[in-house]
Image (cartoon, rainbow, N blue to C red):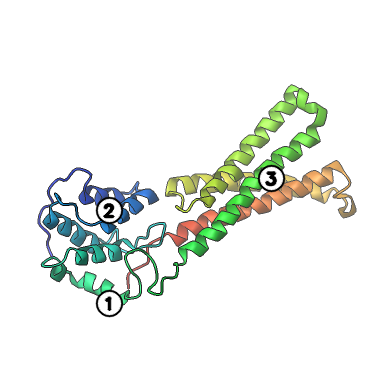
Amino acid sequence: MTSPTIPSLPRSLAELRERARALEAEPADIDALLVAMAQPAALDEDVRARADVLHRIIDDPVLGGLRGADRRRVDETAVHALLALGEPYASELSAEGRKLLRDAPSRNAMGKEANGLPTTADGEWSWSYLLGMLAVTWSFVEILYLAIELDTKLATAKGVTQLLFAALSAGLTLFAPGLLLKQRHPPGPVSQATFVTLTLLVLIAQGLFGFFLAVFVPSNEWTTTDSGRVALMLLAGVLIRLLVVCGLIAREHSSEPEQPE
């Protein structure tokens, strides 16, 4: 179905659609579009223009299958929004729209199942939140442990430099990614790629150094010598960072649109 030209509307659904389908779109743009579609048409809004935008969203291959933070699908929400406009707009539902309505009868426009239970988004966010808390907590543990180990050396320029370097490393590869994992919104592709790359680089360097120290320290001295304790801390940090990387990648994949059949 060919839709007529959509008139320009300030802060319109058409503008939100263009922002959500742009290459640089962030999760917040998807959520903004979902919120706008779920709201009833304003009294002074051109209902014909709104229906035309909804038609385009339903048949849009870019937006099709995309989900918001609460797991609402953009195309399904558009179908419900079009039906809410009543006649004659509801009867204009395209074949793709009717298929969406037929294949997803148990999901309403608010992203809840028909029985009122929450979707899988809550479960995904709960493990992500816990992993984020672990990463943030461990970032403070690493800094605190180094400060204790340095002891009186903290008063020297070398000690301060070492502590600042450790704080920068923990901040970029544990604290900041941990905050992203704690959010309900999955990180954008640029943020996700940046923190995954940084964390992997530190993970590799820290893992090699920790493994090197562990090899030259007898296992029965890992907790009784400075070198052994440092090796254990480094290897533990490697494990936490590996979990962070896996968590960021998992959240990215969980927010990918489903492939159409």
Residue at 19 percent across and 43 percent down: it is 10
Sequence-first tag of 1 and 3? 1
In the picture, residue 40 is in which quadrant? bottom left
Sequence-first tag of 1 and 2? 2
Q: Is residue 99 above or below residue 21?
A: below
How far is the residue under mark 3 from the one under mark 2? 47 Å
Q: Residue furthest front?
A: 43
Pointer 3: what residue? Answer: 206
Q: Which of the two marks, 1 or 3, is nearer to us in this view?
A: 1
How far is the residue under mark 1 from the one under mark 3? 53 Å
Circle 3: residue type:
Gln
Q: In the image, residue 162 lies at what x, y percent? A: 71, 31
**Which quadrant holds the C terminus?**
bottom left
Residue at 59 percent across and 46 percent down: it is 199
**Which quadrant holds the N terminus?**
bottom left
**Nearest the camera: 116 or 46?**
116
Query: Which of the labelled discs sits on residue 36, or is there none?
Result: 2
How far is the residue under mark 1 from the one under mark 2? 23 Å
Query: Which of the labelled discs sits on residue 28, or is there none?
Result: none
Q: In the image, residue 212 lies at what x, y percent? A: 77, 47
Circle 1: residue type:
Arg
**CB under 8 Å between callouts 3 and 2?**
no
Q: Is residue 187 left or right of residue 131?
A: left
Residue at 88 percent across and 52 percent down: it is 218
**CB under 8 Å between callouts 1 and 3?**
no
Crowding near the residue tagged with mark 3, few <14, some 14–19, many ≥20 C-alpha atoms within 10 Å:
some
Pointer 1: what residue? Answer: 102
